[in-house]
């Protein structure tokens, strides 16, 4: 066996990151600022005991427009899929819908609708993408056994319908006060995107959408080239 073959076998396999999406929900201002978040259970292998925003991997069904969604045309297809995933995962993990009340009546639940589509219709809420702001993208380091290529969105509490509740995915789900203290433990990417979200909400963020990644073992911030479509 030559050295090249032996080295190839001993090198850890690089896991390809899976596309994912997450939603940062904020309410209040200054010292009264609150974040809707939950804690990952201690028994899970990936980030146990860590507070996170609701979110998760993008599923194939997220590529299909929903019945009753609105204002998706301003997003490129990749970001539209990500937005649907962020809304779906938020409903699945913390029990709230994000959107707005329709002006002309709500959609009616029908056979063939996905669970999240039925939830929106039954609640009389439209999954309105224009309440979301795309704020950044992050890629999990190569050394991590489970990697994600995550797009982060921001929405305000006025677009939230329902009361947050814990699920199998997240514990201690609530509007946590963060204006006076840091919610710990937080991972570095969570801290970075939360700071970015607050700055965007306050109108003080730079216009470039950041890409948070790791290169040569160091955390770096570049510019994400994904952007909204100019109509």
Image (spheres, grey):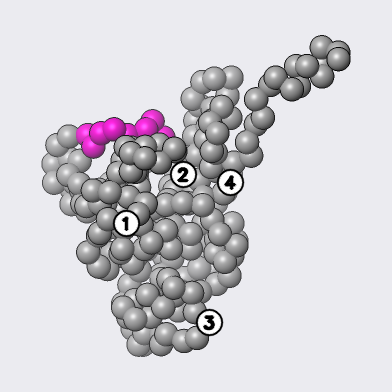
- For the point 56% across and 27% down, which residue is it? 143
| Image position of 58 with respect to 42: above or below | below
Tell me, yes or no, whether the two marked residues, 4 and 1, touch with CB atoms within 8 Å: no
Residue on which disc 4 sits? 18
Who is closer to the viewer here, 210 or 90?
A: 90
**Real-space CA distance between mark 3 and mark 2, rounded to the nearest whole angstrom:** 33 Å
Q: Nearer the N terminus, badge 3 or badge 4?
A: 4
Residue stretch rendered in magenta on the structure: 182-193
Residue on which disc 2 sits? 136
Choose mark 4 or mark 1, whichever is in front: 1
* Residue 167 numbered tag: 1
**Real-space CA distance between mark 3 and mark 1, rounded to the nearest whole angstrom:** 25 Å
- For the point 59% across and 41% down, which residue is it? 17
Q: Nearer the N terminus, badge 3 or badge 2?
A: 3
Label 4 crowd bin: few (<14), some (14–19), many (20+), radius 10 Å: some
Secondary element under disc 3, as helix, strand or loop, is loop
Label 1 crowd bin: few (<14), some (14–19), many (20+), radius 10 Å: some
**Real-space CA distance between mark 1 and mark 2, rounded to the nearest whole angstrom:** 26 Å
Label 3 crowd bin: few (<14), some (14–19), many (20+), radius 10 Å: few
Choose mark 3 or mark 1, whichever is in front: 1
Secondary element under disc 4, as helix, strand or loop, is strand
Residue on which disc 3 sits? 112
Secondary element under disc 2, as helix, strand or loop, is strand
Q: Is residue 76 magenta?
A: no
């Amino acid at each position: 066996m030559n050295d090249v073959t032996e080295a190839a076998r001993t090198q850890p396999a690089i896991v390809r990151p899976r596309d994912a999406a997450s939603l940062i929900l904020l309410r209040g201002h200054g010292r009264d600022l609150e974040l809707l978040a939950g804690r990952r259970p201690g028994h899970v292998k990936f980030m146990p005991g860590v507070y996170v925003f609701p979110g998760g991997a993008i599923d194939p069904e997220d590529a299909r427009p929903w019945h009753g969604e609105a204002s998706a045309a301003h997003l490129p297809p990749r970001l539209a899929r990500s937005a649907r995933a962020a809304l779906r995962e938020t409903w699945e993990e913390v029990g709230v819908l994000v959107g707005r009340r329709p002006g002309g009546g709500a959609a009616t639940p029908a056979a063939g609708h996905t669970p999240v589509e039925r939830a929106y219709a039954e609640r009389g809420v439209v999954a309105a993408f224009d309440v979301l702001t795309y704020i950044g993208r992050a890629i999990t380091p190569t050394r991590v056994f489970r990697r994600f290529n995550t797009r982060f969105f921001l929405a305000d509490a006025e677009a939230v319908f329902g009361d947050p509740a814990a699920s199998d995915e997240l514990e201690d789900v609530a509007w946590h006060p963060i204006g006076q203290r840091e919610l710990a433990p937080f991972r570095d990417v969570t801290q970075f995107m939360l700071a970015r979200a607050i700055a965007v909400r306050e109108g003080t963020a730079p216009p470039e959408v950041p890409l948070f990644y790791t290169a040569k073992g160091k955390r770096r911030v570049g510019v994400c080239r994904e952007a909204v479509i100019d109509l």
